Image: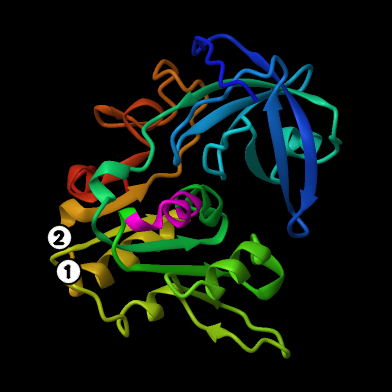
Amino acid sequence: MERVLINRSGYAVQEARILAVEKLTGIETLFTVIMKDDSFFDFEPGQFVQVSLSGVGEAPISICSTPETDGRFQLCVRVVGRFTGAMHRLVPGDLLGIRGPFGVGFPIESLEDKDLLLIGGGCGVAPLRSLIQYVAANRRDFGRVNILLGSKNPCSVLFADDLQNWSARPDLNCILTVDEPEDDWEGQTGLITTLIPPLNIDPDRTCAVIVGPPVMYRFVIDELLKKNIPENRIVVSLERHMKCGLGKCGHCQIHDIYCCQDGPVFFYDRIKGLRGAL
């Protein structure tokens, strides 16, 4: 595909075509999409888009893939209401409305040449996947890479094929744990925080990235601080309802910052003192 970039206004809705639909779990589906006009959709890992369906509404959804040369990108959607329920009824060939991309992605330049500790819990594995894919594709740009992923139970594990591929790579240390194991589960069991203390890491050259449910952050950050990882090298992606994506509606405002414009990715030292941030 010819790499044709177009000027995307934050207000303008562009049509995208669904290329593939893959059921990941009982409530999560992966959509592979491409812009209807075949223009290249340029974004950074960690950004999100506003997805709309005519007559249904609009919702913010994180991009869960890294930028592809053919212009494709992927969205992982969990059924939580009317809009996402409607999305789960879509099939290849159907059209979506796309605004964006929005927000600040993962700080790739700050992560380069560093050892990485990438931590994802629950549906937070989806946006973190965009960074993991980028790191795996540009492996020489980074030091040691530890990937820690947590899920409620084996049935809710996202991207099982990716996990198998990452675990098979000798240059990636990928560990999955589940809170509630089933009888035939042979992997790690327990909260994701239990995976951090045994790690042998160099705090002077390690950057940590955390994406997951809000309840997870404080406990994970406590463990990272015990490992002497500096606050200015801990990266978090905040979960907020970013209704407009333009910093206008105020739904995602925390004091003087707007997650849709200033985030959703922040260094911990910037937001740690803001009440309600974590």
Checking the image for residue 117, the label placed there is none
Residue at the spot 27% in from the left edge and 51% down from the top edge: 111
Q: Classify residue 115 as left or right of residue 164.
A: left
- Residue tagged 1: 203
Kindly identify the residue that appears in the image at 56 percent across and 51 percent down: 126
Neighbour class for label 2 at 10 Å: few (<14), some, many (≥20)? some
Which residue corresponds to the image point at 51% horizontal and 71% vertical from the top-left?
169
Which quadrant would residue 17 be assigned to in this image? top right
Range drawn in magenta: 132-140
Residue 89, x across and y down, in percent: 86, 38
- Tell me, for residue 230, which label it has, or none: 2
Q: Is residue 186 above or below residue 72?
A: below
- At label 2, the amino acid type is Pro
Relative placement, left or right, of 141 versus 270 is right
Asked if residue 99 lies in the magenta stretch, the reply is no
Secondary element type, mark 1: loop
Up-down relation of residue 259 to residue 135 (above or below): above
Q: Amino acid at mark 1?
A: Pro
Q: Nearer the viewer, residue 26 or 36?
A: 36
Q: Are marks 1 and 2 in contact (CB under 8 Å)?
A: yes
- Tell me which corner region of the image, top left, top right, bottom left or bottom right, holds residue 46: top left
